[in-house]
Image (tube, helix red, strand yellow):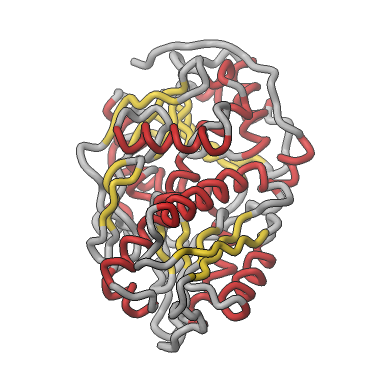
Amino acid sequence: MFASHGGFSTRMRSIATLLAATTVLTAGCGSRATDEQAGSNQEGCADTSGPTVTVGAINSLSGGLAVSETVIHDAITMAVDEINAGGGVLGKQLKLLSEDGASEPTVFAEKAQKLVNGDCVAVVFGGYTSASRKAMLPVFENANALLYYGQQYEGLESSPNIYYTGATTNQQIIPALDYLKSQGVQSLYLVGSDYVFPRTSNAIVKKYAEANGIEIKGEDYVPLDGTNFSTVVNKIRTANADAVFNVVGSIPELVLLREYNSAGLTPATMPVMSMCVGEEEVRSIGAETLAGQLSSWNYYETLDTPANKEFVADFKAKYGPDRVTSDPMESAYAAVKLWQATVEKAQSFKVADIQNASGGVTIDAPEGPVTIDGENHHVTKTARIGRVAPSGLIDQVWASPEPITPDPFLKSYPWAKGISG
């Protein structure tokens, strides 16, 4: 049913750095912003009348999450540089002000406040965990400013002041389940880190499974700072499920998958479908450990399209031939280009004009065409399933026939009724 690749890797990032990352990954599920929450109709203090327009970025450049977010900042910087090299936006050059979220949601909120109300930027790009986004959301709504958030997340949120360019649930989790079902999977074992995103994801998985005749053989959550998962792996082994649905991140994922290999489990006997394994994670965990395993994303470095070939070549030329591209940084890059396209359509940098013009704005991103939904501020995305290759890259094995319309509240799935954050 699944191709088999074996191996075990001893390559590992700094334990201390990655363990620090887990302490801030308490991402919570969102909820729709009410009219009362959406802030005022005031216009921010951004001055776009001169030859230069100031824009902001907030990423963790220090702390445990810097290992994941520095590459995202690199992608945002590259997008801004490309725009400036091409003549700017509406003929104006962009000046990028970068702030360090320091891997702490409260710092993200403080830096957002500084950029929006102190530096008077026209837009902010950034955020990583849902915790950082949720901490920043009231800042943007109260100031009627714009945040472009480029990361996959658990859905169940929509704000007039945020544009979500990463995947929502029906563009990553549900396609992964559809793929497993198409491969004959009739039972799953669920494992996730112990915080809200994995628990919400698995609540959706269980609803899907109930509606599609898939048995849940077990469900476990591992500590955010845990390093011993032999008991969980033994339960996975003895459960004899057809596949594992994995929403574990950071160092626990490294330990879990190594113990999975040590227990004699293989992609051929019990494949793991991961929501958080991209090219950067493969480099961290080791290709030998992950070869043959599956991941669900919307972008892989190996995509064979002219837009992606140019993107990868430009990124490696700018930052080094050994660097890899990945879904989180690609969607952050696309966020900058979507803002540019929307401003040019609106012929204005004003928030209200951008909001009114955003619906239907489309760019040919490295991942493929993405289009803004003017109602919920998410974007269409092509779902992709990949298999980790021995080279350390991820090869696409399936893609949705066309970009999937975002449905962050799963309104179009009757079986999802009652799911909430």
Camera-side residue of 96 and 52:
52
Residue 368 visible to the viewer: yes
Displayed quadrant of residue 375 = bottom left
Report the residue at 35% width, 41% height from top: 366
Number of numbered discs visible in the structure rendering: 0
Camera-side residue of 20 and 218:
20
Residue 219 visible to the viewer: no
Report the residue at 53% width, 73% height from top: 121
Rendered location of residue 346, percent (x, y): 28, 72
Report the residue at 63% width, 39% height from top: 250
Q: Residue furthest left?
A: 401
Relative to residue 73, is residue 14 drawn left or right? right
Whether 99 is drawn above or below 278: the answer is below
Camera-side residue of 91 and 370:
91
Whether 131 is drawn above or below 85: the answer is below
Rendered location of residue 27, percent (x, y): 58, 56
Q: Point out the image quarter for the N terminus.
A: top left
Rendered location of residue 69, percent (x, y): 60, 48
Whether 191 is drawn above or below 286: the answer is below
Displayed quadrant of residue 359 = bottom left
Relative to residue 62, is residue 71 drawn left or right? left
Rendered location of residue 399, percent (x, y): 28, 33
Whether 40 is drawn above or below 281: the answer is below
Report the residue at 48% width, 69% height from top: 123
